[in-house]
Image: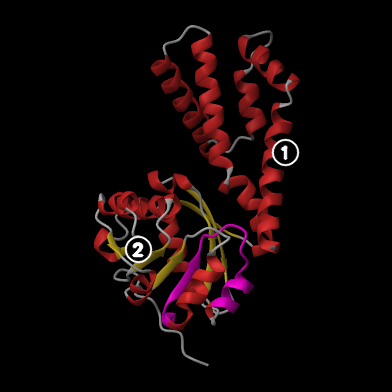
Amino acid sequence: MMTIVPIPSDSYKLGFIGAGKMAESIARGVIKSGLLPASQIRTAHLGYDRRTAFESFGVKVLDHNSQVVEDSDVVILSVKPQVVEGVVLQLRSLLSEKQLLVSVVAGVKLKDLQEWAGHSRFIRVMPNTPAAVGNAASVISLGAGATKDDGELISKLFGAIGKVWTADEKLFDAITGLSGSGPAYIYLAIEALADGGVAAGLPRDLALGLASQTVLGAASMAVNTGKHPGQLKDDVASPGGTTIAGIHELEKAGFRGILMNAVVAASNRSRELSNN
């Protein structure tokens, strides 16, 4: 069996197969953190808009995925689940166990990725789009051929753009439903809060600013105080006050159940993709 060659932690070249929003978010976050300069990151795309998006923050954009593979030590697959098999099979002859392969593709299992690629030096990661502002929630799971050093390298990479957890791959569908899709639920909540402010008489800009900062502040409290969110909620809700009146309306509408159902629905869809 081939000896695994360690990836140099400070000078490796990072390539993205797929130049969509997730790849852009990760690349922007990594550069913003200072972990890697833009000169060490590359992707490929022929479309003007996607090329311009990456070139605007210094990333080299090539014409073909094969060029990215040939010029990268760490290759991140960031394509749609429906096309990932074909993409990996097309690149298989170029892939080497000297390279570390990483997948951020929702619903696609390591065993399939490893079979298509022809080797098992693979790590699966479920990040989310707040990577672009350094606040991603990412979970990693190592493939059979990935080393401890590989895991530490990818933990450091994704740790530069947020917080990282390690979990068994069997949990990834649920993780996708919660943290992978979760930002979209929160954006809906921010928009709804702002609309409520407008309905109550606030100017749109003020309402949106207050809604966004309120969500940010509440999340920071949940992360940093160590208190259960139920306790934090109780700290705001005075007897007979304004907050408990609002909470009463949310409970009547099934607010918590709706969010729970959204997570479960997204998890089930991830499971469907992984079984197709």
Magenta part of the protein: which range?
A: 94-116
Residue 206 can be seen, yes or no: yes
Labels 2 and 1: the sequence-earlier one: 2
Residue 147 can be seen, yes or no: no
Look at the picture and state if 16 lies above or below 263.
Answer: below
Which image quadrant for residue 12?
A: bottom left
Q: Residue at x 55, y 34 (%)?
A: 186
Look at the picture and state if 115 lies above or below 151.
Answer: below
Left or right relative to 30: residue 109: right
Report which residue position mark 2 lands on.
Answer: 44
Query: Where residue 85 sits: x, y (%)?
Result: 56, 69
Q: Residue 63 colored magenta?
A: no
Left or right relative to 145: residue 157: left
| Eye-nearest disc, 2 or 1 | 2
Look at the picture and state if 257 lies above or below 119.
Answer: above
Label 1, secondary structure: give it.
Answer: helix
Q: Residue at x 54, y 21 (%)?
A: 193
Query: Where residue 27 sits: x, y (%)?
Result: 36, 55
User: Marks 2 and 1, how far apart in space?
Assistant: 37 Å
The label shown at residue 261 is 1
Q: Residue at x 71, y 16 (%)?
A: 248
Amino acid on which the number 2 mark rests in the picture: Ala
Query: Where residue 236 sits: x, y (%)?
Result: 60, 19
Task: Judge the density around disc 2: few (<14), some (14-19), many (≥20) Cα neighbours within 10 Å.
Answer: many
Amino acid on which the number 1 mark rests in the picture: Asn
Label 2, secondary structure: give it.
Answer: strand
- The residue closer to the viewer here, 57 or 212, is 57
Left or right relative to 195: residue 63: left
Query: Where residue 144 sits: x, y (%)?
Result: 59, 77
